[in-house]
Each structure stands twice: as structure tokens, then as C-alpha cells.
Amino acid sequence: MLLEQIEKANDIKYIDKEDYGLLAEEIRDFLIEKISVTGGHLGSNLGAVELTMALHLSLTLPEDKLIWDVGHQSYTHKLLTGRREGFEQLRKFHGMSGFPKRKESSCDCFDTGHSSTSISAGLGMVKARDLKGEKNTIISVIGDGSLTGGMAYEALNNASRLETNFIVVLNDNNMSISENVGGISRYLNNVRTADSYLDLKEGVYKALKKTSSGDSLIARIRRLKSGVKQLVIPGMFFEDMGITYLGPVNGHDVNAMVKVIHEAKRVKGAVLVHVITEKGKGYAPAERHPARFHGAEPFEIESGLPKNPRNTANYTDIFSTVMCKLGQRDERVVAITAAMPDGTGLKRFHNMYPERFFDVGIAEEHAVTFAAGLAAGGLRPVVAIYSSFLQRAYDQVLHDVCIQNLPVVFAIDRAGLVGSDGETHQGIFDLSFLSSIPGIQVLAPKNKWELSDMLKYAIASDGPVAIRYPRGEAYAGLKEFRAPVEYGKSEWIYEEGEIALVAVGSMVKTAEDVRRRLKSEGYACSLVNARYIKPIDEEMLRKAAGGHKLLVTMEENVASGGYGERIRAFLDDNDISVGKMSITIPDAYVEHGNVELLKQDLGMDAASIAIRVKEWMEKT
């Protein structure tokens, strides 16, 4: 196998040109085989095989720098830098990450996981290179979906002033996670079809090359705002910004891409290489269903169907169902997603109420302020967004929604530990950063019925409300406990004595197990469903502190700024004496791995918590 000849970075340069096609085929077969077992990002990686090969043939790693936007398309890059054996434990606890990690390889020069960051990071590396007097090549790869993020344009605006080389490769497959939307997508579609421009460019340059002053004329044409591109494609966006545009080039032709990358290296300034690829290429199920194979669970290779299909609804399914019902009952209800209608469960709402559904692209900041405008206009917007991605819109939540007390509902999916995507995707900070904002209500449901009740409550509220819920199967327990959602009120589930477990959202299920374990040891144990993280239920806390020896708070959030820390502050500030224990995630970034394994490692599983509580009780 050719792939076995690649044991370290730059080994691909010893592969014969005639074998590039065979190597690409071997890489695709390898990725399909391994990801069918471990799960992972398949479609984006299959589409970027030849592109990655061309980049590695054109660069010398790790001296040259290659920055991947998001990074979920870096599997071939990992293969070509000697990490083939790591795919056995891809995205598993203590195994190889599914994203670039500097601690994993010197060839991963920048950690990524969120969209639209690669150009900014690459530009920073270019400036560092120039200040140090170095001469290495720096390339940022960005997808057309990521170009819907405003940060990319902030970086391009700065890059346009460069007088030294910086290459941006635009990997254009007309897909991010779901189908791309908006003006940029339409613009790139027009560029894709511009064969006349490509033919004219090649013909003019060849003719000029034959003249004695051809090189200087070509340089002048490239600098002119009204150059060749504007003759055929009016308003060439990147050239108008001052960025040299090369392409489009077939992203599955290794030799063509190597040629254009070497041409790009000669440019004294920022240059954008436009590469056309097909997401999921080489695997029919991924070609037919690119969204499904963006982040695939383990699947059967022959059919592409999941090996372990879900038989129960998850929290996203519950949200989807309730949103459709709310949309039917109230015409003011509108839904916003940042390029994730499938992942957030809004696809059904879109099908039923297309005029009230808005996909703004990968632009979380815009999504939130857009929602603020909708609310100011008299509507009831629901922004469905992953916890990890909501971090990007903190300023807009505070400045544009909460200061004005606008009735925007934030449906925060994937809150808490999410597992295999690791540090960049764990939703373990939202309780902290949202709780710092005055005026917002922050709630967490204990089960699927409470999520439904909270959504209905939030739509009827007159100010901002955030509801955070976890990834995975929707908990169906404690169905008999369904007290109405009231502002700032927790829910007493079991009232006994000695120990009070006060659990937030997903941790209620764990708290049930902890309570059973403690009761089997002879302890009296109460259980409170916190419901409200902001504002906290002060009445409940006074009651719990007065009738118990130990108050245990439980949350899937970092300790700093979290629910437990705020409870401790309230008790201390009010001189309320009671034993206190906080079950939280340490102030650290949590790596990738199975959620249950992560909880055990963090001491957040029921067995570990019960042991800690029992030890505390025995010491007092």
C-alpha cells in the first residue's frame, strides 16, 4: 500500500506523480473504514483528500505552516503526518483528537474547532514571520461555509494590506454542515461557472508572455482594479479588496492544485486560491447525504446506515416538536439558526413555516442581534444554538438583547459535556457567562417534559430567557413531578433530611442515582431540581440549609462562575451555616471521549459523588 509508505511529514513527496490517484483512493478507503467504526467527520474529509495532498506536496512541514479552519477536515493531514495508527482511537478518551492539536503534532500549528478563525490566525503568523525575518510559507484553509462568518472578512480586510506572501485556500464545496445560504454562496456559485474568465485569463497571459515586456504588463494587469477579472466577472470581490484571486481550480486534481499553489507563493501580498471540491467524494452515501455524514456515528459501510440507530427521542427532537406546536399556536414565533437547521432540530419548523425560519449562516453574533431586531419589531424569536457556539455571541446577548430586556429565547443545545469533539465543543461555560448578565433568566430542564414546559414559559415571558439542555437521549424519568414553571422557583422532588442534593438540569438524573446509593447506606436524602440558575431560588436555599447538615450542588459546568459558586456566595453573604459541597467540572478544558468516561474521570458520576458525600458525612 502506498499509504503505508507515509510514516512522517513530507513522505508524500517520495510518491510518484502517477500514483497520486491511487494514494487518494487508499486514503478514502482508509477513512471510510476507520470512521465507520469510531464515528467522526466523514464528508468534509472525503472532499479534501486531493487538496490536502497538494498542500503537503507544496509545503515543507512543520517549517511551513498550515492552518485549518474549524479543523474537522484535517484527517488526511493527520494521515500524511504519520498519525495513521491514531485512527484506531480517533475521538476516544485519551485517543487522537478529531481536530488539529498543537500538543499532538508539531505539524498542527494552531488549535481549531470553531469556524472562520483560520485567516486571522494565519495573518498573525505571517506578521510574526516577517518580524522575525523568516521566509516560510503560511497557508490558511477556509471553507465557503466559514466565509459566512464575519470574522473571516475582518481578517481579509487586514490581509489586503500585506506586502509579503500569505496564501488563503478557499475550499468551496457549497456546503458547511447544511447547505450554504446567502449572498456569498450565490457569488461563489457564479464564479464556479466562469469558464469564459478562465479561458480569457490563460489566453491573455500566454500572449503577453511572448512579448519582451510581458512580465511587467502582467504585473500591471494584476494590480489594476479594472483588470482582466472585471472584464468578465464584474465586481470581483476579493480583487476589489486588494487580494489576488487565483482559480477556480479543480480540487480533485492534485497536479493542477500544486501548480496554482506554487504560483500563489510568488505573490507579494495576500492571495486567495479558489478550489472547487465535492463533499463526501468517493463514497456514494456521503455524496447523496452530505449533511448526514458531516458528523457521522458508526455506520455500515455498504449502506451508510447507522450501526446503532436511535430508538428514543433526544432533547433536540423534543425541542423540534415543541417549536412546531408553538409556531402553530402563535404566529409571532420565529426561529433562527446559525447554519445548523438539522443539528438544532429546526428543519421541521422550516418545512412548516418557511417564512418564519431564518438561517443566517455561520454567524452567531449576527444571529443574536438579528433576533434582537425581530423582538424589537414585536415578534418572539427563538435562537437555537449549541452552547459552545453561543460563546461567540456573548457581547450581543448582553449588549443587544439583555440591556434592552427584549423577549428573545435562547435554546441552548449540547449544554454540558458533549463527548467526542473535545475541548472546543464541550458546553461547560454557558451557566457562568450567562449568569453574569443582569436581567436574563437561565433555566435547565430535568427531563423532556420540563423542556417542553420551559419553552412554553419562555415564549410567554417579557424578557430574555435561556434554556440549556444536554446532548443525547431525553430523560423520561420523574414524569410524575411536573410542577408549573414559576419565575425563580426550584422544585422539591423528595424532602427528607441530613443531605440535600440540589441538581441542575441533566444532573437531576445523576442525583437520583446518588440518592439511592446514599439511602442504601442509611442516610436521609432530599432531592431538589434547581430549575433556575438565574435567578437562584433563595427561599429554597434557606429551607435546605435549615433542615440539612450538607447541601450538595450538582452541575455540568465549570466551577468558576457556576451555580455552585453562586450558591456558596449567597449562603456566606447571608451568614447561613450549612455544610457545602459543589459537584462541578474543574476550571479546565475537558478533552474528547465518551461522556460517561469523562464523568468518571472528573468524579461526576453517581458512584464517585456518593463516595464523596459519604466521606464528608462520616467526618462530621
Image (cartoon, rainbow, N blue to C red):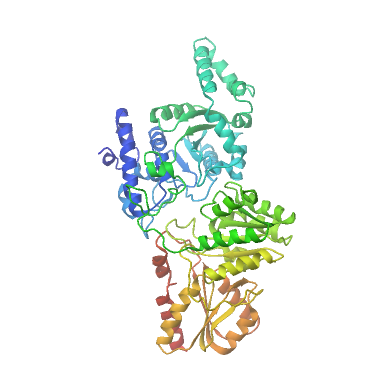
Q: Position of residue 460 (x, y in %)?
A: 68, 66
Name the residue located 47 percent from the left edge and 26 percent from the top edge. Answer: 263
Residue 329 position (above or below residue 74): below
Q: Position of residue 152 (x, y in %)?
A: 58, 42
Residue 402 sits in which quadrant?
A: bottom right
Residue farthest left in this picture:
1
Q: Seen in the image, is 461 located left or right of residue 427? A: right
Count the marks: 0
Q: Seen in the image, is 506 located left or right of residue 61? A: right
Residue 280 position (above or below residue 601): above
Name the residue located 58 percent from the left edge and 85 percent from the top edge. Answer: 544
Residue 89 sits in which quadrant?
A: bottom left
Q: Position of residue 573 (x, y in %)?
A: 65, 80
Viewer can see residue 414: no
Residue 7 sits in which quadrant?
A: top left
Q: Nearer the viewer, residue 137 or 611?
A: 611
Q: Quadrant of the N terminus?
A: top left
Q: Position of residue 108 (x, y in %)?
A: 42, 46
Name the residue located 51 percent from the left edge and 39 percent from the top edge. Answer: 174
Name the residue located 38 percent from the left edge and 33 percent from the top edge. Answer: 57
Q: Nearer the viewer, residue 229 or 163?
A: 229
Q: Nearer the viewer, residue 247 or 265?
A: 247
Q: Seen in the image, is 26 located left or right of residue 224? A: left
Viewer can see residue 412: yes
Residue 100 position (above or below residue 222): below
